[in-house]
Image (cartoon, helix red, strand yellow):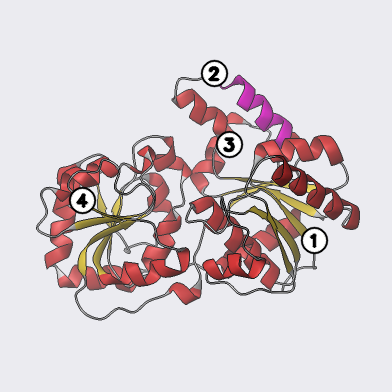
Amino acid sequence: MIGQSRAFFWLYRATAPSVRAQSIQVVNAAHALALRGHRVTLCVRAPAGDRPQPEEVLDAYGLESIPMLRLVVLPAGGTASSVGFRLAFARWVARNPGGVAVARSKRYAALALRWFGGRFRLIVEAHEVDSRQAAERGLDPAGLLALERRVLAGSIGVVANCPGTLALLREAHPDLPPAVALHNATHPSRVRRPTGPGEDIGYVGSVLPEKDLETLAIAAGRMRRRVVVVGPQAAGGLAGVEAEGPIVHRAVPDRLARFRTLVLPLGTGLFGQRLTSPLKLWDYLASGRPIAGADTPALRDAAPAGSVAWWTPGDPSSLASVLERLDRDESLRASLVAQARVRTWAERAAELEAFVDAVCR
């Protein structure tokens, strides 16, 4: 560990275990920071109808229980879960004056400032700019803009998930506190070295509109190989692709390694262009398989140079052409895989630690 040991609390309450990106990111980020010797408290909501033990939650992500991580599993939802979260935070504040709360939720951050302002130090973790995204959807952003201002004014620093998010925050809030962009990551245990040619073209993740699976579905109709979508709601209305249901996080690397080529589509809106550091990118880079990626500024910034074959977002012909070339060009496939670099949660934790040390001086 390069800095002093600190007490951290995650101001977020993800459902865990879960295949949702927010859950994966928060659990891995907290675990990695605890491995560096910090005392980390993380509360999660149990899945509906279940109440796993903390070690079971971590095992679903391929992680081990460690003494420096206090994982609190709350009821699935409702009043009991909310009250349990508030009590856990209140106890943490009482025991750790001047501790660092990492707010993945601006609403939780605002409540924490109202209840305990001045008794802890707040770091805002921004994976979105809600006011700008509301405006993009044609909604009135005034309330969200006011919330952002209130939370940012009470924080000592901002950690954005990518440079695009940080730049958009600075556009909306020119008086932003000290800030840094830290990309997401994966775990070294998820690295694979597959042998054999692999089968099918694969996508593993959600089918939310901003992911632009429609373009993939259209391109699939022009491909000789099957296109397989693995994830929540995968069977919902994507004609032309084969659908597989979601798999637990620890099973994803082996499934990725069985594909021949991996595809990472993104839309043309704010999310795909500026606001994302896709978790799937880092797992894809660890898979040992070549990647066809939507050519957006956000993805260009995140991917190591030379590690992705680019296609034009929203253009099925461009995607089909790139996938066909990847299917037949073995030298291109080998080149892409050779340039892949695995970014780890341990690296990100060290970067977060260095930033917190700087703003807490």
Task: Mark 4 vs mark 3: give the one in front.
Answer: 4
Q: Residue at x 12, y 47 (%)?
A: 221
In the image, taking residue 42 as reference, residue 195 lies left or right, namely left
Mark 4 — residue? Answer: 241
Q: Amino acid at mark 1?
A: Ala
Q: Mark 2 or mark 4: which comes first in sequence?
A: 2
Q: Which residues are magenta?
A: 141-152
Disc 1, SS: strand
Q: Secondary structure at mark 3?
A: helix
Type of amino acid at the residue the image marks with label 2: Asp
Q: Which residue is mark 1?
A: 7
Q: Secondary structure at mark 4?
A: loop
Q: Residue 289, image x and y in percent? A: 29, 69
- Identify the mark at residue 43; answer none if there is no mark: none
Looking at the image, residue 174 lies above or below residue 63: above
Residue indicated by mark 3:
169
Pointers 1 and 4 in contact (CB under 8 A)? no
- Mark before the other along the chain sequence, 1 or 4: 1
**Mark 2 surroundings within 10 Å by alpha-carbon count, few (fewer than 14), some (14 through 19), many (20 or more):** few
Q: Nearer the viewer, mark 2 or mark 4?
A: 4
Q: Earlier in the sequence, mark 4 or mark 3?
A: 3
Q: CA distance from mark 3 to mark 1?
A: 27 Å
Query: Label 1 to label 4, Cα distance in Å?
Result: 47 Å
Between tags 1 and 4, which lies in front? 4
CB contact under 8 Å: marks 4 and 3? no
Q: Which mark is residue 140?
A: 2
Residue at left offset 90%, top offset 52%: 94
- Mark 2 to mark 1 CA distance (whole Å): 38 Å
